[in-house]
Structures are given as C-alpha cells and as structure tokens.
Amino acid sequence: MQENLREILMGGQTFSWNEEEDGVFSAVLNEKVYRIKSIEDASSDQYLRSYFDLDYDYEKAMREISAKDDILKEAVDRIGLLRLLKQDHFVATISFILSQNNNIKRIKGLYDRLSRNYGHEVEPGYFSFPTKDELKNVSAEEYRALGCGFRAPFLVDAVGKADILDGIEEMDFDSAMSALMEIKGIGPKVASCILIFSYQKREGFPMDVWMKKVMNTYYPGKDKSYFSPYEALCQQYLFSWIRDIS
C-alpha cells in the first residue's frame, strides 16, 4: 500500500516540515536541510532511516490492524501506510507543549517563530529549531511576545528541566509518563505524544477531542488495551481517519 507521506509529516506527529510548491517536503533536522518527495528519498540517509523508523515492519502492522475490526479496516484503506516518527527528544517535548489547545497551522506558526528568533540559520531562509542552550535565557514574557500565550511558563519550565528527557529512554511506559509530567503543563495527552513520537513507546494512546469522539462513538466501553500491541499506530490511524471524514 502507498505510503501517505503527507499525513505522516503534516498530520500532527511533527511540526518541523513544510510542504513546498513543487511537492517537496522540507525540514531542518540534525543541522541539515532535508528535502524529500517520497519515503524512498529517506532510505539512504542514516539519520532519516531512524527518524522514519524504516526498519520496523509497518506493512505487517497495517495488515494486522486492518483485520481487527471494520472501522480500523476503513481507516487503513482510506489513509494508507503510516509511520510513527522518532524525533529529537527536546524538539518533540517543546512542540507538544505548543500543541496544547491549538491546531496544526497555529502550532507550526509558533514552531517557525521560535526557530527564526532563537534557532540559527542552516541555509539561507532555513532555521534550526532552538536547542535547550539557545532557549535557556528566554523569559515567559518573550515567549508570550511570539504568541505562545498560557504555554509560556511551561516552556520556561521545560527548558529548565530538560535533563529529565535523558533518562526516559530506559524507563517503562508508566514511569516515563510520570517523569514527563514533572514538567509544568505536561499532562497525560502531551506526555503520551512525546513518548510515541520521540521515544517510540508504542503503548501510547493520546486522547484529544478527536479521539474522544472516536472512542465514544465507535468503541464505547473499550480502552487502549483493545488495540494492543499496536495502540499508538491504531490511535494515529483513527485520529487521521476521523479528521478526514469530518
């Protein structure tokens, strides 16, 4: 089945990528500007192989998800092949703090403003997302001036507690959730997103308004255990599907 690269890159897993007029997706990652048109363009680059999780058997997962029930089959058939990205821990943490009570377009706007104001230029017009060192002296007032609103003090706290992110990899899922929620403003939904889209902890099942609608309408009485062992990937299919049909 065809990879749905646009949904993978523009559907809420990441806010790093831009879709350019010629069908190319571009992003500044790992101190480099990447430009790709298909997943095949990522296969020869070691960094992108890890980023796109190219060594995981998504086709097998997709077949097993599709066989679970009619809703998931419809979602898989409609959306195509999805992947779960493995992003930089700090970038993902700040990105999903920005995502609170927000939509994808506005989140990307905040992401880009942070990059232009506090990151550094990698190529003309292309700016890296700022590191924790580049953000260490930024105040809540300065974040508010960029439009971050109520998230501003959460960003200050996250930068100050960024060392927490270094120990998450070795933790089990529940311990990792608890550790992330020591950062102000990170609740279960944001923590779960960070664990899926940066640490590849596949038990995650973030619940936003879209997923609450899915679960209440199509899976009453069920919880994430119904989707095991593909909780995170099922969530991403259902999230993409419900937005597509609404």
Image (tube, rainbow, N blue to C red):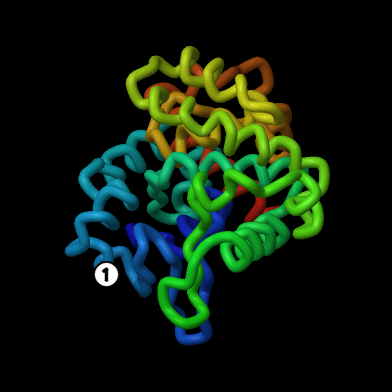
Residue 154: x percent and y percent?
70, 36
The part of the image, by quadrant, that contains residue 145 is bottom right
Q: Is residue 62 above or below residue 17?
A: above
Residue 13: x percent and y percent?
52, 49
Please give the name of the residue rendered at 47% of the width and 13% of the height, measured from the top-left corner: 175
Residue 98: x percent and y percent?
67, 46
**Position of residue 168 in the picture relative to residue 226 (left or right):** left
Residue 219: x percent and y percent?
63, 26
Q: Residue furthest bottom?
A: 22
Residue 69 in view in this figure? no
Residue in front for this viewpoint, 2 or 186 = 186
Q: Residues within 10 Å of mark 1 (few under 14, many from 20)?
A: few
Q: Is residue 157 above or below residue 174?
A: below
Q: Residue furthest front?
A: 137
Please give the name of the residue rendered at 51% of the width and 35% of the height, measured from the top-left corner: 194
Residue in front for this viewpoint, 224 or 142 = 142
**Position of residue 231 in the picture relative to residue 32 (left or right):** right
Residue in front for this viewpoint, 42 or 130 = 130
Please give the name of the residue rendered at 33% of the width and 57% of the height, measured from the top-left corner: 1
Residue 162 in view in this figure? yes
Q: Is residue 99 above or below residue 109?
A: above
Name the residue carrying label 1. 41
**Number of numbered discs visible in the structure rendering:** 1
**Position of residue 122 in the picture relative to residue 178 (left or right):** left
Under tag 1, what secondary structure? helix
Q: Residue furthest left?
A: 44
The part of the image, by quadrant, that contains residue 4 is bottom left
Please give the name of the residue rendered at 27% of the width and 48% of the height, measured from the top-left corner: 50
The part of the image, by quadrant, that contains residue 200 is top left
Q: Amino acid at mark 1?
A: Asp
